Amino acid sequence: MTDRGEEVAGDVRDTDVVALAGALRKAVRGEVGFDVTARALVTMDASNYRRVPLGVVAPRDADDVAAVLEVCRERGVPVVARGGGTSIAGQATGTGVVLDFTRHMTALVELDPGSRTAVVQPGLVLDRLQEAAAPHGLRFGPDPSTHSRCTLGGMIGNNSCGSHSVAWGTTADSVRELSVITARGRRLRLGQGWAGAPDGLRELAEGELARLRTGFPDLPRRISGYALDALLPEKGADVARSFCGSEGTLGILTEAVVRLVDSPRARALAVLAYADESAAAEAAAGLLPLGPLTVEGMAADLVPAGAGLPAGGAWLFVETGGETAAEARARAEEIVRAADVVDSLVVTDPAAQRSLWRIREDAAGTATRMPDGTEAWPGWEDCAVPPARLGGYLREFRALLAAHQLRGTPYGHFGDGCIHVRVDFDLLTEAGVGRFRRFSEELADLVVAHGGSLSGEHGDGQARAELLPRMYGADMVGLFERAKAMWDPDDLLNPGMLVRPARLDENLRFSVLPRRPVDVAFAYPADGGDFRAAVRRCVGVAKCRTTTVSGPAVMCPSFRATGEEEHSTRGRARLLHEMLAGDLVTDGWRSPEVLGALDLCLSCKGCRSDCPAGVDMATYKAEFLHHHYADRRRPAAHHSMGRLPEWLRWASRARLAPLLNTLAATRPLAGLGKHLAGIASERDIPRLAPQTFTGWWRKRKTATPGAGGSPAGGTGDHPAPTPTPASNPGDLVVLWPDTFTEHLAPSVGQAAVRVLEAAGLRVALPPTLLPRKGTIGDGGTRPAAALLTARRARVCCGLTYVSTGQLDRARTVLRRTLDLMEPVLRAGVPVVVLEPSCAAALRTDLPELLPDDPRAARLSAAVLTFAETLERHAPHWTPPAVDRPVAGQTHCHQHAVLGDAPDRRLRAAAGLTGELSGGCCGLAGNFGFEKGHFEVSRACAEDRLLPSVRQASEDTVILADGFSCRTQLDQLAGVRGRHLAEVLAEALDRADGER
């Protein structure tokens, strides 16, 4: 028997693709993409499924949509409407032409506070509507956790809900009128009283009134199937409402009139702790009569350590509203009194509330990994039961998981009886896929037995449509098919969804991946060394597509700069997935499509922390460049900037800094040099310091000789400072002379020495003598003999080699560094790294490139930031009072890898007030200097950094610990940014001068 999915695929393969693309380009004003990249970016949504389309069209208006439908209808080509691509059931994928509404049809056409309505285009992101409505005290009620990137069209297509549905219902409850175009080109305006109904739909409904009145379960989150009961006369014969949740199978939405609701002036959040999730689930329904805005549930296995929740095994997040903060708090406290809880917490501070809600919103990504790192997948992401039956259902659900030897982590909308869960299905093997099918069938029966809906929010798609007969029976499903025929008699709109569906275990996105791991350079410890698993981390929740970010968030600066899916973390992950699959992207590691997408990746590492699934695109980019340029000619920038430590050491040894600075200041010569080096012509070449940091250190030692601070008892070359006078000398620390501090900003290193010593610490530099045989102090080589044969070398974190994908060279450099650092590691001395990008490289890239060298893990663990060093090793030291506001930016690598909590505490102790911005400066090491990157680099800086500096008062201290950040500020804003060490050292000098 041939399934519907195979029939569609066969039809598509018979299409004359060149003729189709040509006809579309003639017919529409929007972009038409039939190239590999355009298609690869939309093969998947946030589900388990994958379909390769023929092409993608970004329509500019309704006329473009009509033109696409006409061209495709003439050729029998399916059409799929796509918004943010965050659907979890596969309904945003297709084999024909995909309509991408996120590029042009994104307007808020009108907002009328008087009527509390808004007119929106389908590609408008929900948060943009919320921002426009907020000044009027209004909001759109439904708010999925993907609110920062999901579109109104997608929400209408799926009948999305979100955490506030207990107060404001589903998207269907917020829709007044819809403008749609049918596959045969009819333009309809849908509304109540049969407005816009296609021919035959009224007769169909009026002939099945009894079935429509009795065939649908009565529960708040019934999303599955077509909402034909909205056509009942007692429900206003609401064609617009019946269209909601149809997943693009009935018509293409081009405009919507939606209702807005009053937004509470103040909110409070009651966090209720319970022993386990069943107890929380059983309590949820009892809170509904108190009128909460949300009743959300989570268990401990989804909550990160240190989240600040009250003690318990599961929690309900119950939000309340009021005209005043006191009223909102009073309602929250009433909730607490009414709830039988283990513990509780009422939060009224908006920032603290946002922090807690972020845990809940990120669950769609964090749930993709079990606590032991095992992968988990959607598939039964959002089934719903009557809220009063949720506790019993969850217990039976857990028992069914156990019976199939599966694990899952339920969370979600407990107040609506809707549960999200990712399950550790094995979707890579035939046996695992078979278990997935059996579990799905049995769970469908369990949901139905509890009076539930297979989908409570995300739609049926391919994941559940096959099982709809178990919920509705064959006759009701037959009625769905008849309704589909009234709207779309040719079955061109999103075929294989809802009616005549593809099987739930077909088109799995994992099936096309290679069966064996690919050879890679990095260890990928969180993914078992498997690059396929690393790429699979991207489940498509698309947090990287957020166009505005707040607080310390970084991801994804290149997407915010260009607005192109290709330059989002998800887009790049999709191309890497297709590269591994090999049937669309066919050149493997040599792929120009993947190279093009990765070209604008800043390697900011923001996704490593901000992506809820933990995608690390900076590492994936380095891996790809390593393979792509193997035995091939590299770009000039890889040689000029990728090998920067070598060039700068050579210039230092040859004493060429003055000459090079002169040449760089001579415009014609500088222009020629930049051209040859692959450097953007818009950039100024930073000046080399006339004296290196270690040169200053040696002179300082000669001028003030004293007891050494060597961590290896004097072996190797350890220039030592004069210790701070004290009855009990402080801890010894080794200060890392990174390339930027050494050659370009030695004042940062000098300031750090000043502060560290003032805090009572003894400072030393790393060894610089590398034995040719054996190791100094290894017990097998006489130290004197070893010193005679040793050669000079410098430590290096390998950052510039990693960022340009020169991983073989990076490993060589890092092994040499480990050889040099052996005495330090044996002595257990902490290593202070001032440049955040270098510290991040030592923390993460080093052990992941040299996983079999135990010294790599030891050095990684020894690395401390400047603030961490003072906090851990000089805890009783009081920094000088600066007492000034600050602006600037937290380094993106610090945010993503190192954390900045110690920095915040150090700034507070010094009286430095205010917050640093998030985001990325846009220079990002070599990125912003490379030819062709200047405009994107500047756009990234304009996103967060430059506005924060322009808005600063004259007495504001501009902080930027990274050399790239300081260079960007200097070159784009004419502002001098300073490392925190420089600010504190200056304050120390000032205090000394006042004594």
Image: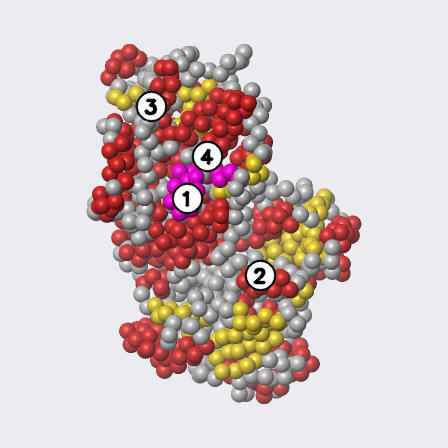
- Between disc 1 and disc 2, whose residue precedes? 2
Residue 970 part of the magenta segment: yes
- C-alpha separation, residue under disc 2 versus residue under disc 3: 55 Å
Check disc 1: other Cα within 10 Å, few if <14, some if 14-19, many if 20+: few
Estimate the x, y position of residue 505 in percent, counting from the top left: 45, 63
Query: What label sits on residue 131 in the rendered view?
Result: 2
The front one of 120 and 336 is 120
Q: Nearer the viewer, mark 3 or mark 1?
A: 1
Pointer 4 local density, CA inside 10 Å: few below 14, some 14–19, many at least 20 = many
Mark 1 or 4, closer to the camera: 1
Give x and y (percent) for residue 338. Answer: 78, 52
Q: Which residue is mark 1?
A: 974
Residue 455 placement (x, y as % from top left)? 57, 65
Label count reads: 4
Q: Is residue 990 visible?
A: yes
Q: Residue at x 56, y 83 (%)?
A: 196
